[in-house]
């Protein structure tokens, strides 16, 4: 790196974007918290907040180094090289935004918030039944063995970047984490749901969302934060950031409409939960693609993600896996649509070196092949390693709460608190 | 003394309450209730999962009156709670052995 000169505008934008992405984790707590039953809302929200705690610390200790430190075999960064990030120089080789005049600590701040929200997403698959100690351990192990290696392989110059084998076809592109975040967490949710087993009464007893206004507020805040997630991924306050902002919102709009149309035709009524689910599915599809496509492409990708997501929510009942809050339908499906869709819609001046325009913009099949390879490789990696983690954890500890705790509610059983005051509001225990 | 209990449609409460006040009835207790009769329930769909909700939200009114007022109360409630559609509810009356006003300790009709 030549002498590093800080760019105040770009640095300000990245720091603000990091704050926006940080807000997405409490937003996810609301989004998910409203969808579970009232007896487990605190546990569900606490899973997101505790991901902030655990992954925030892990990221500083070895997460940043494993993601963007010096390469080890194309799989992962050396965890010891930048362990603890005590003295990270501006313009450090790990700082992928240095070319935009953004200091390494700003890049780290932005990336840390990505790791946190990705891990928090997993809580949707394990609702109402995972022991809290098992969750804390899972956040530590999964971020270390799945998220950081994936971030390194895709963004840190590893096996799934242009420097890897896919690069012979074309440079695979993932703007803000369609493979690293969405496919990685989506398929991991499926694996965890299978290993953990279904909730008591799944598919039989009613498990209605207890507070959809929470869920809608959470979705609104997610949308807001996602503008930092995607437009901030440009690493600069520039043309690509602007188009990413527009594409992100465009995809959310059509995702929302697409989900509603499917519901209206299939179930007879358009629902509020469907609207916000569709918006999030569109945001997911925009994540990998928003920096590389034009707005018409973003409109189509959001619509496809919304409609396919609405179609995929029924799968868990037919196949019998309790992906409680639909990581598969929203994140896996949307992530695949956005990541592979780049191969169809990529265009404009912001493509990576070695990447091609999409099929619909005269670039032929090369980029489509590279994107498909990236999506499938990320899916396979996360599925295999998550399965190994889940099975290993199940051997060393009980993952599920006892049946009576699940039936009575994990808020009271695990945390000794309840979200809502009933008729019996208790009295102060004296003398304790 | 009599206890008149009514289960009514929630949106009829204001009219019933005003009519009872107009008839000189000085107190009533309202609680939220849910149940079903011939009206049956409805279905709700969340992300494609359909739930049959059997219990419909209702309000339960309880009015304590002297024997001679019971029929008036029943008539007023039936008249004002009615919309003519299924699910309008029911009104029933039972005898009450004793009533005590907590503040004064008065018994019987004095306490009503």
Image (cartoon, helix red, strand yellow):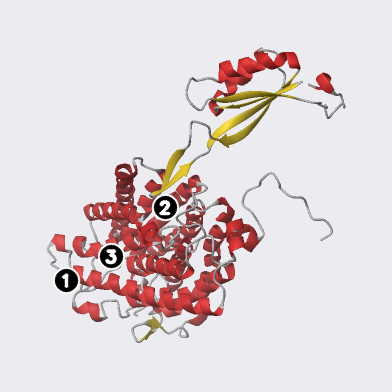
- Per the model, the C-alpha gap separating discs 1 and 3 is 14 Å
Percent from the top left, x then y, of residue A409? 60, 57
Could you tell me if residue A287 is visible in this image? no
- The residue depicted at 24 percent of the width and 62 percent of the height is A341
Q: Is residue A65 above or below residue A286?
A: below
Q: In the drawing, does residue B32 fall left or right of residue A118?
A: right
Q: In the drawing, does residue A371 fall left or right of residue B78?
A: left
Could you tell me if residue A133 is visible in this image? yes
> What chain letter is assigned to the residue under label 1?
A
Same chain under badges 2 and 3? The reply is: yes
Q: Look at mark 1 in the image and give the residue it sits on.
A: A366
Q: Look at mark 2 in the image and give the residue it sits on.
A: A224
Q: Looking at the image, is mark 2 or mark 1 nearer the viewer?
A: 1
Q: In the drawing, does residue A182 fall left or right of residue B20?
A: left
Q: Nearer the viewer, residue B10 or A289?
A: B10
> What chain letter is assigned to the residue under label 3?
A
Q: Is residue A37 above or below residue B3?
A: below
Q: Is residue B68 above or below residue A296?
A: above
Within the image, what quadrant is residue B65 found in? top right
Q: Look at mark 3 in the image and give the residue it sits on.
A: A339
- The residue depicted at 24 percent of the width and 59 percent of the height is A293
Within the image, what quadrant is residue A129 found in? bottom right
In primary-sequence order, the first of circles 1 and 3 is: 3
SS category of the residue bearing label 3: helix
């Amino acid at each position: 790196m030549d002498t590093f000169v800080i760019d105040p505008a770009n640095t300000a934008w990245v720091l603000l974007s990091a704050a926006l992405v940080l807000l997405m984790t409490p937003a996810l707590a609301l989004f998910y918290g409203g969808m579970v039953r009232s007896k487990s809302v605190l546990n569900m929200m606490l899973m997101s907040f505790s991901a902030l705690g655990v992954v925030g610390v892990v990221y500083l200790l070895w997460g940043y180094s494993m993601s963007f430190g010096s390469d080890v075999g194309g799989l992962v960064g050396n965890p010891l090289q930048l362990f603890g990030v005590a003295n990270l120089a501006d313009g450090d080789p790990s700082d992928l935004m240095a070319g935009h005049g953004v200091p390494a600590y700003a890049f780290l701040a932005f990336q840390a918030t990505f790791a946190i929200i990705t891990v928090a997403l997993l809580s949707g698959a394990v609702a109402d039944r995972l022991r809290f100690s098992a969750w804390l351990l899972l956040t530590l192990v999964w971020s270390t063995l799945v998220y950081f290696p994936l971030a390194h392989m895709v963004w840190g110059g590893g096996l799934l970047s242009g420097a890897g084998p896919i690069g012979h076809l074309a440079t695979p592109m993932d703007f803000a984490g369609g493979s690293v975040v969405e496919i990685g967490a989506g398929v991991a949710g499926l694996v965890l749901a299978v290993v953990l087993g279904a909730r008591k009464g799944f598919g039989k007893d009613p498990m209605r969302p207890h507070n959809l206004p929470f869920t809608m507020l959470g979705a609104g805040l997610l949308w807001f934060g996602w503008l930092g997630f995607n437009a901030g991924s440009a690493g600069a306050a520039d043309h690509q950031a602007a188009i990413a902002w527009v594409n992100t919102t465009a995809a959310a709009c059509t995702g929302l409409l697409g989900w509603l149309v499917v519901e209206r035709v299939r179930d007879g009524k358009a629902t509020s939960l469907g609207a916000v689910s569709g918006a999030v599915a569109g945001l997911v599809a925009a994540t990998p693609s928003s920096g590389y496509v034009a707005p018409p492409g973003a409109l189509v990708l959001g619509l496809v993600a919304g409609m396919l997501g609405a179609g995929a929510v029924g799968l868990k009942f037919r196949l019998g896996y309790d992906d409680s809050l639909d990581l598969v339908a929203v994140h896996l499906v949307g992530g695949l649509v956005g990541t592979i869709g780049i191969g169809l819609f990529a265009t404009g001046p912001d493509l990576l070196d070695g990447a091609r325009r999409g099929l619909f913009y005269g670039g032929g099949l090369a980029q489509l092949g590279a994107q498909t390879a990236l999506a499938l490789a990320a899916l396979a990696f996360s599925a295999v390693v998550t399965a190994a983690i889940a099975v290993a954890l199940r051997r060393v500890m009980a993952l599920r709460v006892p049946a009576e705790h699940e039936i009575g509610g994990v808020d009271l059983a695990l945390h000794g608190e309840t979200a809502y005051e009933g008729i019996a509001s208790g009295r102060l225990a004296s003398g304790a | 003394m009599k206890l008149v209990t009514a289960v009514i449609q929630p949106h009829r409460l204001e009219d019933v309450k005003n009519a009872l006040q107009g008839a000189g009835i000085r107190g009533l207790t309202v609680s939220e209730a849910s149940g079903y009769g011939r009206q049956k329930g409805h279905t709700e769909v969340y992300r494609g999962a359909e739930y049959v909700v059997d219990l419909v939200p209702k309000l339960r009114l309880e009015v304590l009156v002297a024997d001679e007022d019971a029929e008036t109360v029943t008539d007023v409630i039936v008249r004002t709670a009615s919309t003519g559609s299924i699910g309008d509810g029911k009104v029933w009356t039972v005898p009450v052995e004793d009533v005590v006003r907590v503040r004064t300790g008065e018994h019987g009709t004095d306490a009503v």
